Amino acid sequence: MRHTISVLVENKFGVLARIAGLFSSRGFNIDSLTVGETEDPTVSRMTIVVKGDDRILEQVMKQLHKLIDVIKVTDLTKKDHVERELVLIKVAADTSKRPEIMEIVGIFRARIIDVNTEIMTVEVTGAETKIEAIIELLKPYGIRELIRTGKVAVARGNK
Amino acid sequence: MSKLNGAQIVVESLLKENVEVIFGYQGGAVLPLFDALYDAPIKFILVRHEQGAAHAADGYARSTGKVGVCIATSGPGATNLVTGIATAYMDSIPMIALTGQVPTAMIGNDAFQEADITGITRPITKHNYLVKEVNELAKTIKEAFHIARTGRPGPVLIDLPKDVSTGMAEFKYPTEVRMRSYNPTYFGHPGQIKRAAAAIATTSRPVIYAGGGVISSGAAAELKELAEKTNIPVTMTLLGLGGFPGDHALSLGMLGMHGTKYANYAISESDLIIAVGARFDDRVTGKVDEFAPHAKIIHIDIDPAAISKNIEVDIPIVGDVGNVLRELNKLVKPGDTAAWLAKIEEWKKKHPLTYQKEGELKPQYVVEQIYEVTKGEAIITTEVGQNQMWAAQFYKYLKPRTFLSSGGLGTMGYGFPAAIGAQAGHPEAVVFDIAGDGSFQMNIQELATAVQYKLPVNIAILNNRYLGMVRQWQELFFKKRYAQTDISVAPDFVKVAEAYGAEGILITKEEEVRPALQQAVASSKPVVMDFRIAREENVFPMVPAGAALTQMIEGMA
């Protein structure tokens, strides 16, 4: 099962290594990990997407919580939450293909942020399903380069 | 306010934390620190290898309940501490390891004697710090001691770059620690405690399974009260030995791989297990699927991550063991355990811990005699392997903090430096390291330390000229192919002892055992006793790795 875990941590050096170490020491491969400062500059929020057996993952979450610099650990998978990822896609787009690609970009409410005679760079933001769908549609044109930020997620409402 | 340099700040901070003894080794990056310690009212014990410093600090901590402190220089000094830090981490021992580091400007440049020790020790410390600013030093040390000794205790490393040790700052030691991210739970949930009391009242075949948490929490009296109030027998883990008196009628001794048959039978047939400060280690549970198949499980532990880690628990109670037991003792009413205790008594009679007494000198006999001569009042440390298991089986630990052994990591070479630490913490106590010839040779150089500081530890080598436990496994599971376990080429331990300025005694017969032990206890010097024991003596009973607890191998007819 795939889990989206949100971790609030003290904004100190070495914290990322401690967190990543807990996953790697248990043989977990992290699918994605994003980290950045929150509204409080002394606190960072990490969003970690990881695949794993539920029981072992519960153990990992407890171990995460044991780390001295970790303030809060939440498995958002079980909660109502919103998530987004930013992806930049360089797609082959000679003049004949541009209208088709622009149409796709429009449907997905993505944006073209750079273009030259051969390549268009598309920016897509959204949930994973949307991103997967646009990638599928752009694939036939020839994706030259693709870069993903990894998921950021937050619980809905006050909590 | 006048300023101090970083090294002086460290020393003043250690004094504020009431540190009385430090174990360590000199080196370039810690020169300022040693210079500051030179005039400090702290006893410094210079070991002969940094691993010895970490184990000695650990032994000091386990035997006194205080935080053990060790110091090493950067690079190789720091990496030599690693085994000792990992040992303390696995057994939840409060320790502060101070390491020197190259100056901050040189960190990451592969400078001489540089190692990323905070990186290296990240998975084996409760927490660690690289101090980059001398103004942060006092606060860091305060936090480090707080983290080491509270919650589930553990080692904390502080890496100290040389320029931080020499930098100047005002010394202000914080009076309290506030950390929003670290708040251990000390009191158990009252509802859960009520549920536990209710479960105990209706049980007929209960067992208390007590671990090292009983000792670190100082909860031996509360545990005894619970057992006596409810008439529930108590089995202990290796680290739990001493948490409940080994000579008590309700004691089942140790359980698990080399536990007593009656403890393992009791666990396997019980209907309620009350796990207290124990973590269901694989050496205890045997095959997990067949562990206590009929039992409901209550688990009391300060570490939420220890609960349901290996075994699913029915009634978890997160909190300090002592606090939880105090609350539980107020509520608890005895169930009817008379028939159960009678059954256990039968098992005890039928399957006592014993050994073949004929023939060559037996290690079990030596351990029994150590118990007799010391009247169970010694502090015993062990190395790892057969010596450790015989020491666990044949000596009755009557009080907490009298049995010090590397349980989680299983560190050969632990016992002797740990004995030095224990002796430093208890100058009046009789301290024995029950050793194997293999393990003792791993930190034999600390004889110089014991002699220099007049720490009269007694080293009882159960010498079988083998790496005994591994040889036992080879005998049982590898068709007696003794690949690289024969260590019969060894020094003359008596001469080694004498060469270091200690005493040495060779013992080859039963009748020589008691006089040798009496001589050792009476001596004011460290004494190395070389007990030449039967070479192929085994530790029994034994649950083979991965088997159920009821599938014990027994050597006796």
Image: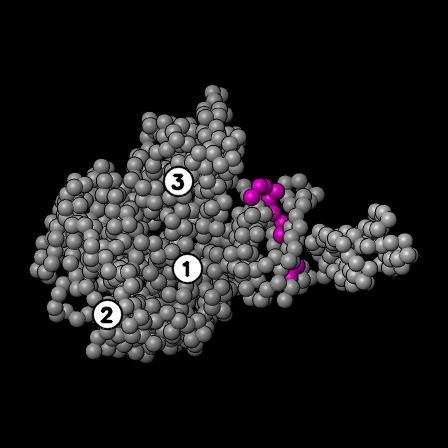
Callout 3: SS: helix
**Coordinates of residue B216 in the picture (x, y in percent):** 38, 52
Mark 2: amino acid: Leu
Q: Residue at x 45, y 55 (%)?
A: B320
Residue ID for mark 1: B277
Mark 1: amino acid: Gly
Q: Which mark is residue B76?
A: 3
**Which quadrant of the structure image shows residue A36?**
top right
Specify the subunit that label 2 lies on.
Answer: B
**Which quadrant of the structure image shows residue B554?**
bottom left
Callout 1: SS: loop
Callout 2: SS: loop
By secondary structure, the bulk of the magenta-drawn segment is best described as strand
Nearer the camera: disc 1 or disc 3 = 3
User: How far, Cα to Cα, is label 1 from label 3?
Assistant: 35 Å
Marks 2,1: beta carbons within 8 A: no
**Which quadrant of the structure image shows residue B546?**
bottom left
**The C terminus of chain B sits in image quarter:** bottom left
Reply above or below: B60 against B400. above
Q: Which mark is residue B353?
A: 2
Reply above or below: A124 against B196. above
Does the stretch in magenta take in B141?
no
**Coordinates of residue B130 in the picture (x, y in percent):** 50, 38
